[in-house]
Image (tube, rainbow, N blue to C red):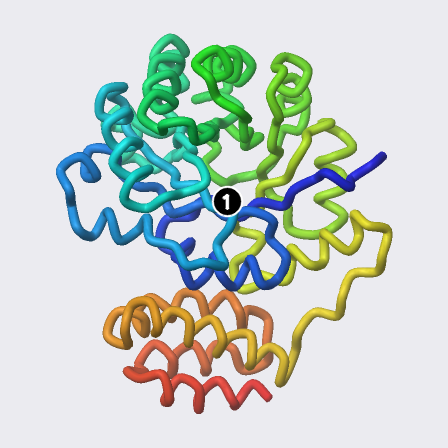
Amino acid sequence: MDYNNTKLILAPMAGFGDSAFRTVCKRWGADEVVSEMISAKATVFRDKKTLELAKRCDEETPFRIQLFGSEPEIIEEAASILAEKCRPDGFDINMGCPVGKIVKNGEGSALMKNPALVEKIVYSAVKGAGGLPVSVKIRRGFSPDTVNAVEVALAAESGGADRIAVHGRTRDQMYMPPVNLDVIADVKRAVKVEVIGNGDITSPEKALEMLDKTGCDHLMIGRGALGRPWIFSEISAVLKGNEAPVIPTGEALYQAMTEHLSLALQDKGESRAIPEARAQIAHYIKGVRGAAEVRNRVNHATSYNEICEILKTIL
């Protein structure tokens, strides 16, 4: 199978997918990145913190902003505002988030219960985007009894979506196994636009399995990149028929972590970046000898220099 046109896309991840992490993933081979999910309603109300989530640096190209909401007119206005202020390369509409507070508001994966509304939302987003492409991210279904990814994908395509990302789990599963690859294949056969496979892509082997069993065009990697942004380089190499690069350890791992932290400091300043970096570092050092002690010390650190000194102990 020819994988030359396959793109590796960093999934939107609330709480993790900030500009620093997206930049790191681009440097490690991600072809595209997507913002953390952004509230359409908060955008329309000009919430300062919400607009900050949509900022990106020059390295983050192509870059799509992911919006969530359930009101077509609000989605349209938010897309128009962000297209002008942030100049993204496109938009993505979240129709897969399983978190309770999002679903309770009829947003995220709750939208899969209403394919007609899906079509209206995508149509409105396309209008507001002013010519920029609009994609959607969906799940297998809301529950095992309502598996309707194909119907929702067709509705999104009818509304003007340029591609569909399919997470092979229902909302009820949250992130529990298994990932259903058949439903991604079903969506690929049903629509004319490109399909992105998503769900538990944690290795080059998993990536190949997703591509071969579903026929999807591209891959979206989320949790598999946490603490391991080089997964993009690993998968890219294997798709090109080469050996996967050596995974960073010791000094190389230390450099990767401090580079990530440095980018976060540049973007947010020390007071914000340090607390947020603790969860990222925990992923980087998972499985490393002495990780528990290092994690505990990092959780009490208050400066960049202090964290760097603590991380040197992994060498």
Tell me if 243 is positioned left or right of 55 in this view. right
User: Residue 25, position in %: x, y?
Assistant: 55, 59
User: Residue 63, position in %: x, y?
Assistant: 47, 46
Tell me if 278 is positioned left or right of 157 in this view. left
Residue located beneath label 1 in the image: 11
Q: Residue at x 63, y 12 (%)?
A: 190
Mark 1 crowd level (few <14, some 14–19, many ≥20, 10 Å Cα) = many
**Is 251 situated above or below 130?**
below
How many numbered marks have been drawn onto this rendered protein structure? 1
Foreground: 86 or 166? 86
Which quadrant of the figure has residue 185?
top right
User: Residue 50, position in %: x, y?
Assistant: 23, 47
Quarter of the picture holding the C terminus: bottom right
Foreground: 91 or 188? 91
Q: Amino acid at mark 1?
A: Ala
User: Residue 250, position in %: x, y?
Assistant: 63, 83
Quarter of the picture holding the N terminus: top right
Q: Residue at x 75, y 70 (%)?
A: 246
Q: Residue at x 28, y 28 (%)?
A: 69
Foreground: 36 or 142? 36
